[in-house]
Amino acid sequence: MDLFDRASQKHAAAREPLAERMRPRTLDEFVGQEHLTGPGHFLRRAMESKQIPSLIFWGAPGTGKTTLARVIAGSTGATFVALSAVNAGVKEIREIVAQAEERWKLHQQRTILFIDEIHRFNKAQQDALLPHVERGTITLIGATTENPSFEVISALLSRSRVVTLRPLEEDELISLLRRALSDARGFEGKVEATEDALALIARAASGDARKALNGLEVAVQQGQGGVVTAANAEEALQQKTLLYDKAGDEHYNVVSAFIKSMRGSDPDAATYWMARMLEAGEDPLFVLRRMVIFAAEDIGNADPRALGVAVDALQAFELVGLPEGTLPLTQAVTYLAMAPKANTVLTTYSAARSAVMDLGPLPVPLHLRNAPTPLMKSLGYGSAYKYPHNYEGNYVPEEYLPEALRGRTLYRPSENGFEAELKRRWEALLASKRRQG
């Protein structure tokens, strides 16, 4: 390599994004995932023994999936081959497998095949990997942001170990940013940053190392005099996006947190998770539909007004839209969170459904049958029916369940809110029925 080649390489490296230049080369440079890479933990032990099984890395963007795969290959002396599931197919897999077989035959060198976004491979493409993973021709490392239980075929999952990578903590991201400021591959100590600026960038990154380094790079460009301030960081981050993929796993996590916060009677948390969804671009009607379901499922007759509040909020939103529509949303979510809770609507229907599924279509008792024709009346249809409005209190003890279900209780009202009053009414009716039965 001559002087011109070295200069060309140096300029090319300088054009690379900071996140790429700062990509860790060894495990000691790798930040985060101590539950996997710390002393005595799974990945470190596997790398030290050079016995790497096929792996599925599951984690949010910027948690180090690609980097960790490269570090594993480097530490074990394996050849690293990367594919993106977006633009690769069975043909490319066959070519890589043939090269891996030749490499092992000539040099006894293993091949690590890294497939980014493996969840985008269809079943046939994933099936094509199976025999080669099983024989050990390649060691597969797949990376996915989606839950592999749903996106990776079971046969491939059974031949791999799923490894979960967590979002980086703020202090880990700040450590990463400081290294970028001082390292020769970063800013070589020529730029400084205030603690407030580093904390702001780390917080906005939401656990994503790549996003943090990109934010620092833009903030350095905004800065003057070699110092990045909080104002520079704010300017650099004004286009930030929230971690919330409407089609991905985080979507279901946030929705789950929203529902559980309302169920747990925490209006602060419920409003926070709702705001997370709305500010990230979730359809407000999706949120409102979840609230309507919640009002019936988790509150029910403990507060019969709750369902009306949720439906009214939905109608109000359809009338005014955004941004004012967040007001009826907030009014409804705080009401639902603070309402008394009872899931008897859910349990009652479940009990009724079980009776139907267990016993099948039981015959309708004769006295409850419709009798529109003389023949039906002659057969006794409806003949013994007691019309409640003809009796004192508009009630008369009667059997309305099929005979096989008599004595079975499906509705068990709770002691919460208004349902306690319904329970007293129900118990009084049952007592009257027993007295007159």
Image (cartoon, grey):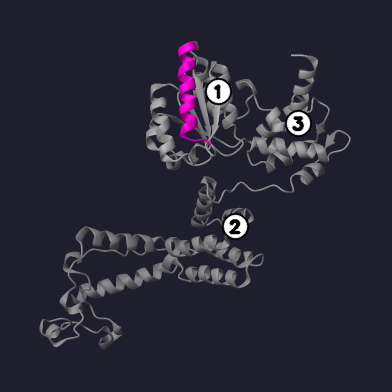
Q: On the rendered image, what quadrant is the C terminus found in?
A: bottom left
Residues marked 3 and 2 touching at CB (< 8 Å): no
Residue 151 in view = yes
Q: Point out which mark residue 80 bears.
A: 1
Task: For marks 3 and 1, give the CA distance.
Answer: 24 Å
Q: Secondary structure at mark 3?
A: helix
Mark 3 lies on residue: 15
- Give the residue type that dot 1 points to: Phe
74 sits to left or right of 162: right
Please provide percent x and percent y for residue 270.
Answer: 56, 56
Q: Measure the C-alpha gap from mark 3 to mark 2.
A: 44 Å
Position above or below: 260 against 154: below
Q: Nearer the viewer, residue 64 or 82?
A: 82
**Res 31 → quadrant:** top right
Predominant secondary structure in magenta?
helix
**According to the image, label 2 marks what residue?**
271
Question: Alpha-carbon distance for marks 1 and 2?
Answer: 46 Å
Start and end of the magenta stretch? 88-106
